[in-house]
Image: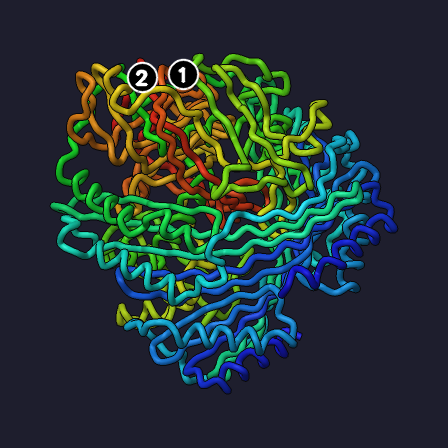
Amino acid sequence: MKLEELKDLADYAINQARLAGASYAEARIHGATGNESLLKNGEPEPAVLVESFGIGVRVLAKGALGFSATNSLDRKSVKQLTIVTVKMAKSAGALLKKPLTFDASKPVKKKWKAEEKQRIEGGDVRWLGSLLREIDGRLTSEEVGVKLPGRFLTAGTTLEEKYFVNSDGARVESRVPRVHFFGILTGVENGETAQRMIQQGESGGLEVVERLDLVKRVEREAKTLGEVLRKATKPPEGTIDIVLSPELSGIAAHESVGHPQEADRILGREGAQAGESYLKRDSIGLKVGSAEANVSDDPTLLNSNGFSPVDDEGVEGKKRRLIQDGYIREFLQNRSTAAELDVTSNGASRSVAFNREPIIRMSNTFVEPGEYTFEELLKEVQLGVYFASFTEWNIDDKRLNQRYVGLEAYLVEGGELKGLVKAPVLEITTPKLWGSVKARSKRMEFEAATCGKGDPMQGIPVWTGGPDTLLSGIKLGSR
Amino acid sequence: MMEALNELAVSTAKKLGVDDAVALTSQGNERMVRFANNSLTVTKNMKETELFVYLGKDNRRIVAATSNPDESSIRAFVKKLFESLQSLPKGSDYASLPERARHYRPSQMSYDKKVEAVGTELSELAGEAIESARKNGGERSAGAVVASVGTSSILTSSGTSGHDRGASITLNIRSFSQDDASGHGLSCASRLSGFDPVEAGRRAGENAKKMVGAKEPEAGEYEVLMSPTVASNLVDLIGGFSSAFSVEAGISYLVDKLGKKVASESFSLSDHGRMDGALDGRVFDDEGLPTGTTPIITKGVLENYLHNLTTAKKAGKASTGNAGTISPHPWNLEVGRGDSSYDEMVKSMKRGVILTSNWYTRFKNYRTGEFSTVPRDGAYLVEDGRITQGLKGLRVSDSLERIFSSTRLISKNREWIEWWEVDTPTLCPWVLVDGVKITRAYE
């Protein structure tokens, strides 16, 4: 199915919605095609091909918001759908306490695409399968030094294409190819097991595979798993310093800064599902961290997994400074939360598919880099633990009480990395974590992740990342 | 229309020379009213058709899904799939579809036409839940009412055919009182007559009110009484771990446990393709085999993994009718009924915690089943059989095997649960567990 052939249908839907009485209408033709290869313990599982095109229509009618979607892409079906959307929204008006409004964001007219050197369409299942077999070959070689009886590997390509129009005059067309990899390695040594989940992904064409250096990366993770199983010892107890790697800095930024600064959570819209926030509508300017706490979200990062320079409400995206020098600076906004909070949308509204409404999402959330080298950062630590990677993690739904369990983690003594320690637990409140940031390194790295939110659920591609982050005076636990 | 799409896909595949082919078309309509702060946030109406195709030839397998299965494009879609299939390496796990053709009629269970007809009434049902919560102490409520209907139709290259349909209506409501104290309520039913938004709202409101003044607990080991909502979150995970695919991949704590004790004798778990009152499932699976009842854990002993044809062949077993072609999965889970009442369970607790809702369950290691999960909404300290205090800021940190091996009591009453944190509809009782590790943030 070609996006070009369906554009008229989006314009048609807008007109039908206005005729049915909508004060605002938008339509999004949203398509995704993809290939996925799976290898389980060296054996190929069925390859997977997916193609999905449909239309999502959103309206405001008598101040009520209605969303509908279908993949029956003919005028009759779309007309019927649009009329029902407006009718449902109007009929629910008795439940509406306050009419919803959108801000006056400038409607964007733009055609944009993610940078792509080798077109994604060349990434067929045979090519992906060969890549996985090469990785698996390394994992079963003697050089890895650990038995890996569980090896589940997947690699895939997707192409996401969208055409968005709304009754305010926005008209946006986009093309985002992505390459992704996911693996779960289970290592066994002397009856003990350890597991590592690896997720990597970027926007871009087939050149992404080379950039990610997957074969070496996964082999390195497998070797580390063996080291953890053989050498890790009990971590130190008591109050010590913690160094978070870019992987840990990223997940902490995502979970305890990005999520609580989603304005829809703050206003209560996700209360029954993803939850609310420890922050309130008047928390801009609140001190939540040390002067070294600086966290941002940026949808414009080239090659990023969360690349979305124009959002799914037709608003230009821009870098958002979430925490600056320890103070809450900005929330993630869409057009309705911006109107409610009397600000302007910063283009954070995204949808994963034609059958999902756009909601406020992070894009690429990260701790800002500092001035230190990694070695200089370690020199600040007399007794501490360096968390290089993590396994189990979670956080409460107000984003106050979080936990990260280390997988690859090292004792730091006298400013130097020592041996591996086993399953250290960082269980900490958000103000304590960000209030303890003492320094940050220069190096920046990003991990791919799939962020879940919404009802029905939407798993959206994001990056999490940052530099090494030094936290001072932290009570450490162990599993 | 669905039969015609299947016929076109399978006949095209057969002409191309495949050994095995399955076409499975599903049509669904989901209507939803979401609310927050006692006010409407959005109405939703999603109508979709999807065609799933499986092809196998010469020990090669491929699956595909298209959401645009119009007759003009199906031939080209299947041809493209066949070309990709031929380029794949051969696997050693190939299992042919059974030669015997079966013909399925829709189950008469669990389909209520009244759910199909529900439309604008959804916002009234949401209003009833909000008002009930408000009357019982929930000052503001958020949630969603969802009415879903779906039909699936199958045709295989062996001639197996049939269709089935299902319907459900669910409400998830969360109420807030002073200081963000919160409570949770669910109503999950396959029939409109069994749907009770007022009761769900009452529970959410009452718990929100009772949680005002909640305190953080001391870390340590406690008896924990899990509500059906909390227990079914963990049981749903066990259902996934019982998939032979998870076991083969080493991402299950049930590896090498067949025939062994994995839970206390009071705990039994089974899966049902169809069951009266169940919210999901069908009479046939994705490979055209009949679904049925599969005991997974019987009196604490792991009795079966869930299989499709491929995993069953490797294990020297018969398929349990749980395909997913790639990964077998449960349809509707049922935890066996116990003989305790809720009051008896609470009275039996010396120093324990009651949990009514949870979220964000994550594993340190799927192979060992070590996990933590974050309780939310109503959570209460119990001392000498009496609720004495609301609790907040706690976390359960334990392992699935240890928890279900330390199950002391199970309630007579059970509820169907399906919501944000429970994917597989689960008929679940209250479950009382000894010695559960509770942690909290250090600062």
Contact, mark 2 vs mark 1 (Cβ under 8 Å): yes
- At 63% from the left and 61% from the top, the residue drawn is B28
Quarter holding residue B18: bottom left
Mark 2 vs 1, N-terminal side = 1
- Residue B354 located left or right of residue B143: left
Disc 2/disc 1 C-alpha distance (Å): 8 Å
Coordinates of residue B310 in the picture (x, y in percent): 34, 70
Q: Which residue is more in the foreground, A390 or B343?
A: A390
Give the vertical position of B216 relative to B402 (above or below): above
- The quarter of the rendered structure image containing the N terminus of chain A is bottom right
Q: Amino acid at mark 2?
A: Ile
- At 43% from the left and 56% from the top, the residue drawn is A206
- At 60% from the left and 45% from the top, the residue drawn is A351
The chain carrying label 2 is A
Give the vertical position of B191 relative to A454 (above or below): below
The chain carrying label 1 is A
Q: Which residue is more in the foreground, A172 or B158?
A: A172
Q: Secondary structure at mark 2?
A: strand
Q: Are marks 2 and 1 on the same chain?
A: yes
Q: Which residue is more in the foreground, A159 or A272?
A: A159
Coordinates of residue A441 in the picture (x, y in percent): 34, 23
Q: Which residue is more in the foreground, A390 or A200?
A: A200
Quarter holding residue B380: top left
Disc 2 crowd, CA 10 A, few/some/many (<14, 14-19, 20+): many
- Name the residue that disc number 1 marks: A432
- Name the residue that disc number 2 marks: A474
